[in-house]
Amino acid sequence: MFLHFLFLYTFQDIFNESFVLVNKLHGNKAITLVNHTNDLTLPIRLLEISNDNLMSQLWQLRFNMSKNFWLVNIHSPLYRSIEESKHLVAKKNLLPGDTNLKLKYVSEDTYKIISGGLCLTVGEINKKNEVEYYPLEFSKCNQADNQGFIFIPRILVEKYNNKERASAEGDDEVNEAYRRLNKELNVAHTYVKEE
């Protein structure tokens, strides 16, 4: 039975259940895996949401029994998010026990990502190879919006990108996506002490 389930859980299922993670201060920008072929560690930055970037911005949430969590990019599933040298990065072939991130519910739809008592913080805008981005670093926790993150289902982002009515109100597909995402978030988040 387990093998049957395993084979039926396809890429389409993973794609349908994926989400983007936006910063509360920068609602049109999402956490993005910056791909450099065959590197063991890849940077994760905040970039503009667009159809061109979307596959690098779609994530799945995973967590272990200790309620440590990690993000898995659906385009590069061998990479998992982790805090390293106070930066959010993606490392190849990490084990579930290697993760060092906690998810803290703040209010309504906002969460903080915490590692070692420090909160993931969106830095000042930078530019590299003509691409504007915001770095993601762990720093002392505060109440600023640059430390708040919101999970948005893929279907809503696609509607936004395609200039469709981007609202959960009266849209069964969007409502179902939020229901699944919220169920997962309710299990993954935990109380974490901030420094």
Image (cartoon, rainbow, N blue to C red):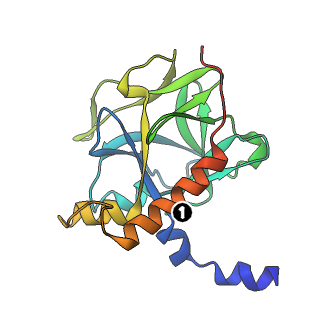
Where does the C terminus fall, quadrant-wise?
Answer: top right
Residue 97 position by quadrant:
top right
* Residue 53 coordinates in the image, percent (x, y): 33, 56
Which residue does the numbered mark 1 point to in the structure image? 180
Residue in front for this viewpoint, 57 or 36: 57
- The answer to whether residue 112 shows anywhere in this view is yes
Residue in front for this viewpoint, 13 or 41: 13
Residue 110 position by quadrant:
top left
Residue at 17% across, 64% down: 163
Direction from residue 186 to residue 1 in the image, left or right: right
Give amino acid for label 1: Arg
User: Local crowd at mark 1 within 10 Å, few (<14), some, or many (≥20)?
Assistant: few
Where does the N terminus fall, quadrant-wise?
Answer: bottom right
Among all residues in the image, which is located at the extreme front?
170
* Residue 170 coordinates in the image, percent (x, y): 30, 68
- The answer to whether residue 33 shows anywhere in this view is no
Residue at 35% across, 59% down: 54
Residue at 69% across, 83% down: 7
Among all residues in the image, which is located at the extreme right?
1
* Residue 113 coordinates in the image, percent (x, y): 54, 33
Direction from residue 8 to residue 37 in the image, left or right: left
Secondary structure found at label 1:
helix
Residue 81 position by quadrant:
top right
